[in-house]
Image (cartoon, rainbow, N blue to C red):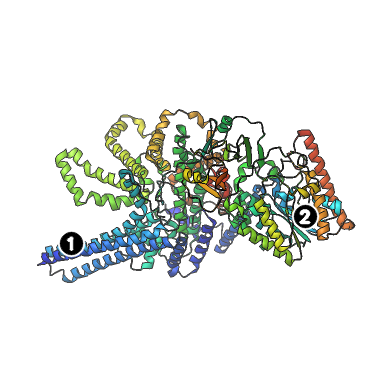
Amino acid sequence: MKTLKTDIENKTNARIFKRLIAAALACVLVLSLLAGCAKKPDEPAENTTGKPVEKTTAAPVKVETFTFKKGSAEVVIGAEAAAILTALGPQDEEPYESESCALEGLEITYFYPGFDLYTYKASANATEYITGATFWDDTMETGEGLYIGAPAAKVAELYNVTIGDSSNISIKKGDCELLVVLENDAVKMITYNYPAELIVGG
Amino acid sequence: MSFVSFGFIAFLAALIVLYYIVPKRVQWMLLLAGSVFFYAFAGWKAMIFIAVTALSTWLAGLLIGRRAAARDAYLKEHGGELDRDAKKAYKARVKKQTYLIMALCLALNLGILAVIKYTDFGISILNGIFRLNLGYFRFALPMGISFYIFQSMGYIIDVYRGKYAPEKNPARFALFVSFFPQLLQGPISRFDELGKTLYGPHAFDWNNISKGAWRVLWGYFKKVIVADRLITVVTGLAGGPEKYKGVYVVALVFFYAIELYADFTGGIDITIGVAQMLGIEVAENFDRPFFSLNITEYWRRWHITMGTWFRDYIFYPLSVSPRMLKISKWSRDKLGQAIGKRVPVYLSTIIVWFVTGLWHGAAWNFIVWGLLNCLVIIVSQELAPLYQRFHKRFKFSNTKGYNVFQMFRTFWLMGFIRVLDVYRDVPVTFRQVGTVFTHWNWGRLFDGSLLKLGLGWQDFVVVLLACGVMLAVSIMQNKGQVRDRLIRRPAAIRAALFVLIVLLIMVFGAYGIGYDAGQFIYVQF
Amino acid sequence: MGTDTSVKNELNTGTDPGVKKPGKRVLKAVLIALAAVAVLALSLWLLQRLLVPKYISSSEEGLLVKEYYSYAGGNDVLFVGDCEVYSNFSTVKMWTEYGITSAMRGSPQQLIWHSYYMIEDTLRYETPKVVVYNVLSMKYGEPQKEAYNRLALDGMEWSPVKRQAIRASMMSDESMLSYVFPILRYHSRWSELKAEDVKYMFKTKQLSHNGYVMRVDVKPVPSRLPVAKPLKDDEIKFADVCWEYLDKMRTLCESKGIKLVLIKAPTVEPHWYDEWEAQIVEYADKYGLDYVNFLKEDVLTATGLDYSTDTFDAGQHMNLSGAEKLAVWFGAYLRDNAGLEDHRGDNDLAAKWQSKIDYYEEMKAAQYRQLEEKGTVDSYWGD
């Protein structure tokens, strides 16, 4: 008699248990939806085996950027400038330098046939980095094959973007931006921008 | 709210003043209010999570307690009428019921943790195996979730085991779960220990205030002067594995060990010191771990409350579980005594370390990190007889010099295992550690290359001096608490020293805009 | 063990023969605590004096905002803006030519809200007849660098205006507290301390001439300049916040009876786009404001500016020669359009300005001397 009772109790218990588990899982689900849009905790996201990592994914991101070629030299936007400048060779025109007002930063524009190249140094002795370039004639091609005068459709095709009302198309790759200006359905200007504030130390 | 912020210091000062002004019976309510305020900075959604954990655990504890009380009352009343078997059966039934309640509570809370923390990891594994391209949820983890859930689960298991009676008042229990000094980084407290002093009443005691303040100050010293300064170098070295090989890896191991030690023990010092200023005793979490002679000892002295948690709530139950006993019997029968008796212990050890790794983070590097720790522990256990023979044979093995060598060995062994979590990528870590032997560039240590990592030589001097101070204090601690000895000095000297340390932290601390770790960003291709 | 405890107990109950009454002990403790707090505060103050940048051998322009308070009062013209203001108009020349009293409140990359609050701050000391705002900073809808905030704000004297200015300017990682206690910002300078940090702990040097910063050397505008980069969509229209502050500036001036004049200095870099010009012209027309764009051919010709001799950094800032030419032309413009008086007959004022002229000449001579000796001007003071 007693064993029977326990048996029944057990079965009921098991059923209740299953139901409760289901309910708990539902709770978990609802809460996880909340977490999906939860604000980032103000805790510094340090990676330590001392403390658990309160971050869900942490795959290191490979830095991507735009590049283009001038002759055999490859210009990598955002990269250290020295080797690239050497590869591009000396120019007749003196580069144009502008100092940051009152601070140490130095922006330099180098003049090459077909394009201006921008670099930045955090201070006189700091490493120089490529921060961008502007093409000003159709002898230059982007790494993907875009040139001044190309039809607008080519931008869409090469960069997989939709062309809307704006005459400016901004294409991002990593931290680097490629800005294409259209006029009368053709490419009028091409500029690369790399945010100088990302280059502080070095 | 970070400990290293003026907001926190202002909050703390206000709280302490109020704490000793209000009637003693409401002190703990003030602490709860303070903890809620503290947690509110993590956002209201995070508060829902901690509330769910607190409420569900409290309720489960209460239900278990009621069942246990009903059982005791029933047995007291009807004990005489039942025979031994019936009593046993009745007890087993109640046990089953309380087990159900506990299991449910565990399922809910660990389920929350699992879903939020491990879903993306699971997806990444699925993506890897089946070449899928499933999207990630990228849940933002509620602040301190790994800690407060483990602390609550320890409580419910203890209540189920009848270790202590459950807390009846939900607000009091909520304070146990959310006590602000230990929310961010532990320690993982036990209810029976923390509960002794958590709820007061606490009369104003200058001794507590002063000792607590010294401990907090010491915590800031370690965290702000050493740890936060070294972050720059550590992130720099870890972020450019292609560029930083060979001796740089050795440097990374070293600096990360110091950084993590200073950061974590410093944070715990602040936690314990703050609690002490409130008259509350929080469990110690470290016992000068870098003085450990081997890894087993290291794990008894590093992140102690986590180690004991895993021991008490996973390792022991696992070792004596019916399934494990079955395995034990089977292995003894099939594999012989020598191997057979090891199987269940090692199996439990492996499982515990796997889970420990997983608890630290949802990524392979943490799992491998846990298993490597496990491997070293098992191997050293297996080699123990060999060591003993060696020690017997050679007399020097008991000398101080040999002990220092052992500490040195443990430090570097742990350090090399630990770099897994700065590279955060298993193959990269192994490749990098390999370069220590293949990429011979020790000259880099002396040619100024280290000064190109974002810190100037002056910073390294500061780190060196501060490490010297930390080491000296650790050695002094051989003879008990340094603060106890300090307190015997004249008040004027103590005051002067306190002022000096505050000034040192203010000037040499790596805080604020001049020390933005993000300032050292280089481009990596 | 036993004796040890008894000694402790004696100490705790105050029966130690050295200290008779518990009251005395408490008093002693309180006194020590107070002394400690006082020593801490004093040390922090001294360390702060030591650690804040002195702006003597680098970023000298950091002196500008604070210097205003030494020449506040009695100025008919107030210039506000960035380096296109403080490098490009000689205040002393405006006095010597026309007897116009003018002051500048400019700092490097000074944003429009900085400028607005500086006008408000100025009104606490004086009410000029004309405010001149250089419109280049309209292009920045948000702060670009924390350092520029510090250069613009650290030197301001404390008042509700300063608090508002800081609130309006702070970047996300800045805190009000670090403006109240600059040591929190500059403590990391301990590793860069130089002799000048000790020497100028309690004193400073005068950089400007009523806000004008002098440079005498020459670096002509080259034959080739960078092509103008195309504007991004969000760069074409000035940001709403800039318009908001321009409106505030205009209404503030109106309410105080001040004439607001907009200018664009004749610098060739950074590029001033036609799209920007059109917006300013439209705004000036709409509210009947004067707008002088020095880049316009006719104005440029009238000023007599020569890009091969009048700039010290290839067209980004004017040198002394350029700044004096602009002052001569613009002084006449202000005299004619804002009805400014000639104060040279006022003896008190004349005496005051004579000492400014003396300092101006002194600095000019020192810079020329250095230019001759070293070939460059690497110190404004020529030392």
Decide if residue A53 is on the left or right side of residue B64: right
Which image quarter holds the N terminus of chain A?
bottom left
In the rendered image, which quarter is residue A88 located in? top right
In the rendered image, which quarter is residue A140 located in? top right
Which image quarter holds the C terminus of chain A?
top right
Residues tagged 2 and 1 counted as in contact (Cβ below 8 A): no
| Near-viewer residue (C267 or C352) | C267
Disc 2 target residue: C103
Q: Residues within 10 Å of mark 1 (few under 14, many from 20)?
A: few
Helix, strand or loop for disc 1:
helix
| Near-viewer residue (B80 or B74) | B74
| Near-viewer residue (B67 or B388) | B67
Mark 2 vs mark 1: same chain? no
Disc 1 target residue: B92
Decide if residue B265 is on the left or right side of residue B81: right
Q: Position of residue C230 (x, y in %)?
A: 60, 46
Q: Which mark is residue C233?
A: none
Q: Position of residue B226 (x, y in %)?
A: 51, 45
Q: Residues within 10 Å of mark 2 (few under 14, many from 20)?
A: many
Asked whether residue B403 appears in the rendered view, the answer is: yes
Chain bearing mark 1: B
Chain bearing mark 2: C
Q: Position of residue B162 (x, y in %)?
A: 26, 61
Q: Position of residue A94 (x, y in %)?
A: 67, 34
User: What amino acid is at disc 1?
Assistant: Ala
User: What amino acid is at disc 2?
Assistant: Ala
For the point 28% across and 51% down, which residue is it? B314
